[in-house]
Image: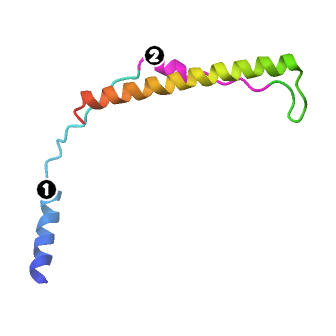
């Protein structure tokens, strides 16, 4: 048991004396298009909570929400592609 304690102590002190000049890779800035698509806000549904919408308001709101959901989906896929490319570039 004492031999294990000595080995553990040597192992831990060896880590403490390791060089401190570890290279940390810097990440590139995200492309402007990716920043813009994440900054886009989703408009609220019109009208007060609990009130009915007219057919025109409901159709317009549904169309806007679907368009925004599609844009957010494309944005997420673009971010995924950017991240995968970044991982390849960094050698992971």
Tell me if 53 is positioned left or right of 5 in this view: right
Tell me if 81 is positioned left or right of 10 in this view: right
Give the residue at the far bottom of this rendering: 1
Q: Magenta residues, as a range?
A: 31-45
**Earlier-in-chain disc, 1 versus 2:** 1
Q: Which residue is drawn at 42% across and 29% down?
A: 80
x, y percent for residue 13: 14, 63
Q: In which quarter of the image is the C terminus?
A: top left
Residue in the foreground of this view, choosing between 65 and 6? 65
Q: Which residue is drawn at 13% across and 65% down?
A: 11
Pointer 2 local density, CA inside 10 Å: few below 14, some 14–19, many at least 20? few
Tell me if 46 is positioned left or right of 21 in this view: right
Q: Residue at x 62, y 25 (%)?
A: 69
Answer whether residue 81 is visible to the viewer in this image.
Answer: yes
Asked if residue 61 is among those painted magenta in the image, a careful observer would answer no
Structural distance between the alpha carbons of marks 1 and 2: 42 Å
Image quadrant where residue 64 sits: top right
Which numbered circle lies on residue 69? Answer: none
x, y percent for residue 39: 57, 23
Relative to 54, residue 11 above or below: below
Residue in the foreground of this view, choosing between 50 and 5? 50
Answer whether residue 27 is visible to the viewer in this image.
Answer: no
Q: Do the residues labelled 1 and 2 touch (CB within 8 Å)?
A: no
Residue marked by disc 2: 32
Relative to 17, residue 42 above or below: above
SS category of the residue bearing label 1: loop
Image quadrant where residue 1 sits: bottom left
Q: Which residue is drawn at 78% across and 17% down?
A: 60
Residue marked by disc 1: 17
SS category of the residue bearing label 2: helix
Pointer 1 local density, CA inside 10 Å: few below 14, some 14–19, many at least 20? few
């Amino acid at each position: 048991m004492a031999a294990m304690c000595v080995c553990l102590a040597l192992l831990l002190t060896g880590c403490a004396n390791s060089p401190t000049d570890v290279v940390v890779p810097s990440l590139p800035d995200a492309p402007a298009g990716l920043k813009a698509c994440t900054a886009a806000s989703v408009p609220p549904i019109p009208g007060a909570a609990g009130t009915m919408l007219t057919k025109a308001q409901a159709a317009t709101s549904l169309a806007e929400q679907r368009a925004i959901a599609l844009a957010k989906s494309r944005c997420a896929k673009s971010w995924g592609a950017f991240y995968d490319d970044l991982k390849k570039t960094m050698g992971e």
